[in-house]
Amino acid sequence: MVPYLHLRLSILQFLQFFIWGSWFVTAGTYLQKTLGFTGLEVGMVYGTTAIAATVSPFVLGLLADRFFSVEKLLGILHLCGGVLLFTLSQLKTFELFYPAMLLYVLCYLPTFSLSNSLCFHHIKDTKRDFPRVRVWGTISWILIGLFIGWLQVEDQALPFQIASAASVLQGLYSFTLPSTPPQKRSENLLQSLRGPEMQALFRDRSLIVLVAAIALICIPTSYYYSFVNLFLNEQGVTNAAGKMSIGQITEILFMLTIPWFFRIWRLRTIVFIGLLCWGVRYGCFIIGIHQSSEAWFIVGLLFHGIAYIFSMLSAQIYLDTRVPEHLRSTGQGFYSLLTLGIGVFIGSYVAGQSVSKHTLPSGLHDWAQIWWFPCLFGIAVAFAFLILFKGRQRA
């Protein structure tokens, strides 16, 4: 890949995840400790991402494939998101915060699939070059996590304001990105979606099992993103946001080495290990609670890299190789719809109910009981995938 193009796409991924990482992990602590939201209300706030993922990525992916340039859509969505993030930092009640958050994620969630689609469009060797670009998103997540932890503002609105400024910057930067026009204007949209290539995808049992497993594993992942920061703070872990970046360090390691794993293992093996790690990590948290050992919490955080890269990213790259080129944005949006939609919506609700149910009179939580469900559920999804996935394709 041309080095200059590599740099431009890397900056795109860096800013994309800088925005998300600024507020996403610490918001649960801010909402519960400072604004006084209940566990269920926190779960509902995080559940807005699932509602947005069910609607906007697929629809805007269709628009990008048929009518509008991807970079222009990205610019408009991020500028709108910057305004909404600053508004969120000023709101104090659930009744106002929830609809504002829903509006924001409706703007932001499609940018994941659109930015990936833009990268896939300009990258010649997806398996080799995309991890090298995508790794800068993880690096930015680490940096902002360390920065938020160093500032000790996890229970304040400042992370939303930092994300707001980054979103405006990303919006302006998006307009300078390489032109990525619609791929096909002449063919009827319904004919494209009902064409032989797409019909073959929906008849592919292995692909359906893969996407279903990724969607189901989003239920235990909802526990991680919504409540692990709060859990670590209640366990007395210092600089919790910074230490959560440990997971992103392993993410970088496995992201850079995933092309090597693609060559030596089948997709079935890679995804199984990734799915299994999502459940095992909560087992580490439970052991750490019973042994009063922060070391086990760190081990659980270390599993994040292999869990995310081997399951989520591997499936995303694999899907891109299967979807027709002129429906690339649609395919990535469809992936977001299935994986970040129903799974996250159910997971956020279940996680919120679980935290509320196990809230102690002191206001703290019985985390050992909370973590049992995502632990067992994640392991069950992994073995169900191993049994049902019959594809023999190399990753």
Image (spheres, rainbow, N blue to C red):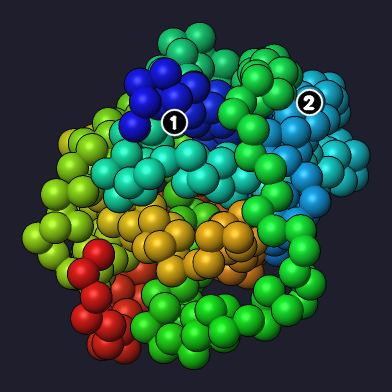
Question: Which of 117/285 is in front?
Answer: 117
Q: Is residue 268 in view from this perspective?
A: yes
User: Quick one: which residue is furthest to the top in this view?
Assistant: 151
Tell me which label, 1 or 2, sits earlier in the chain: 2
Q: Which corner quadrant of the image does residue 94 belong to?
A: top right
Q: Which corner quadrant of the image does residue 326 belong to?
A: bottom right
User: What's the amino acid at mark 1?
Assistant: Gly
Residue found at x 32% / y 80%: 385
CA gap, disc 1 to disc 2?
19 Å
Please give the label number shown on residue 308. Answer: none
Residue 228 position (above or below residue 164):
below
The picture places residue 33, in percent across and down from the top left corner, at 64, 31
Q: Is residue 364 in view from this perspective?
A: no
User: Quick one: which residue is furthest to the left in this view?
Assistant: 264
Residue found at x 57% / y 79%: 198
User: What's the amino acid at mark 2?
Assistant: Leu
The picture places residue 349, in percent across and down from the top left corner, at 64, 63
Residue 326 position (above or below residue 234):
below
Question: Which of 189/253 is in front?
Answer: 189
Would you call the spot at circle 2 few (<14 residues within 10 Å), some (14-19), or many (20 or more)?
many
The N terminus appears in which quarter of the rendering? top left
Helix, strand, or loop for circle 1? helix
Query: With 173 as the anchor, is 56 left or right in this view?
Result: right
Q: Which residue is mark 2?
A: 79
Q: Which residue is mark 1?
A: 137
Residue 200 position (above or below residue 60):
below
Q: Which corner quadrant of the image does residue 335 belong to?
A: bottom right
Residue found at x 43% / y 86%: 204
